[in-house]
Amino acid sequence: KPHAMILGTGRALPEKILTNADLEKIVATSDSWIFERTGIRERRVAEPGVPLSVLAVGAARAALEDAGIAATEIDLIVLGTVTGDMKFPATACLVQEQLGATNAAAFDISAACSGFLYGLQIAAALMASAGYRHALVIGGEVLTSMVNWEDRDTCVLFGDGAGAVVLGPSDGRRGLVHGVLGSNGAFSQLLYNPGCGSLNPPTVANVAEKLHTIRMEGREVFRHAVTSMTTALQRALDEAGLTAGDLDLLIPHQANMRIIEAVTKRFGVVTEKVYVNVERYGNTSAASIPIALDEALRGGRIKSGDTVGLVTFGAGFTWAAAILRF
Ligand code: ACO
């Protein structure tokens, strides 16, 4: 039986659009290369000086309004991100202050693209075990703040944004039916940002070497993403006593159209039952699933009684899947 259900959702995207044609002017690439390899046409970019908290608060306000819940009724704020405003304090605390959510405990989760699904399951577990009643779970990134704009292998992939959900007590039928989490640190150096931390502090020399930007072995990441997302979703379905055929909608992490196609093909899920918006936003990491979930709900793609699968993969490596009933 679910303990927590979604009462409302919201999203916030920067207005500025960076198209593939814009990127052609920055690095040696082309719209056709990017679209064929990734399915991405454009992505949103936060203006300089606009930190994650601005997007996270925008998404949270929309979710609170959708849920009809006051900020003071929130007793838990969990924010999945790897691009917080500062090293510390947690951006969740800055969000708490800006929302006036004065009764909430607030903290960030670092699980890269899996940050939202990690946060969702942690919040639901705290609601089940520790008496929290209304949780705000946010996934948000300003990934363009750590992109190396001279590296065509990576700079074409990422975008900025935030999505949020308000969780409340389940009515016993709707909500988070089941979730799984996983990670494998053996592959940490296939996708990472080596600078900014205690290993390579942001000294002038380290910044000159661009250690503070994203490093990625694209092919290896692709291979692991397909395998881990497939395993995670299968495990979540098995443990919930469901099959892929029971899903009314699947929302995979929006990293790359070819990863989405490879995963969904293995489950035999038809295209109409897979939510895709990667062409408009690129890979927004922890924000991708809550943004897609908000679009799917507001766009009428999810109806009352529907079973929805969520699945993701990211740096760490981390992965996660969840089954929700609406
Ligand atoms: N424009 C044009 N050419 C490019 C570009 C670009 N932007 N980037 C790389 N190339 C070139 C390479 O230099 C290479 O040229 P070469 O053959 O002369 O050496 C050629 O294209 C092929 O490069 P590959 O890296 O082998 O291309 P691939 O087909 O693997 O596609 C990609 C690269 C899109 C990065 C793919 O590996 C991928 O999607 N990987 C997953 C990465 C990902 O999604 N990461 C996000 C974080 S994890 C997550 O969210 C799941």
Image (cartoon, helix red, strand yellow):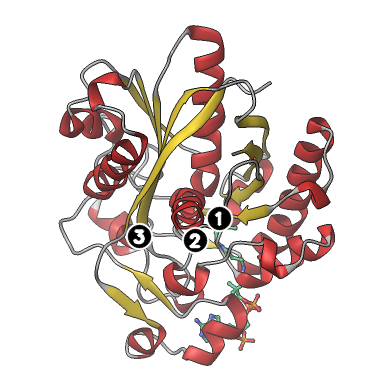
Ligand 1 falls in quadrant: bottom right
**Gap in Å between the C-alphas at discs 3 and 2?**
18 Å
Q: Is residue 212 visible?
A: no
Where is the C terminus found, in terms of image quarters? top right
Frontmost residue, 183 versus 264: 264
* Mark sitting on residue 191: 1
Of the two numbered discs 1 and 3 on the same chain, state the one appearing first in sequence.
3
Frontmost residue, 188 versus 231: 231
Asked if the residues shown at circle 1 and circle 2 are in contact, with their CB atoms under 8 angstroms apart, the answer is yes
| SS category of the residue bearing label 2 | strand
Neighbor class of circle 2 (other Cα within 10 Å; few <14, some 14-19, many 20+) is many
**Gap in Å between the C-alphas at discs 1 and 3?**
18 Å
Q: Percent position (x, y) of residue 74?
A: 32, 22
Query: In the drawing, does residue 317 fall left or right of residue 43?
Result: right
In this rendering, the answer to whether 316 lies above or below 179 is: below
Amino acid at dot 2: Arg
Of the two numbered discs 1 and 2 on the same chain, state the one appearing first in sequence.
1
Residue ID for mark 2: 215
Residue ID for mark 3: 160
Frontmost residue, 96 versus 251: 251
Amino acid at dot 3: Asp
- Foreground disc of the pair 1, 3: 3
Of the two numbered discs 3 and 2 on the same chain, state the one appearing first in sequence.
3
Residue at image position (60%, 85%) is 36
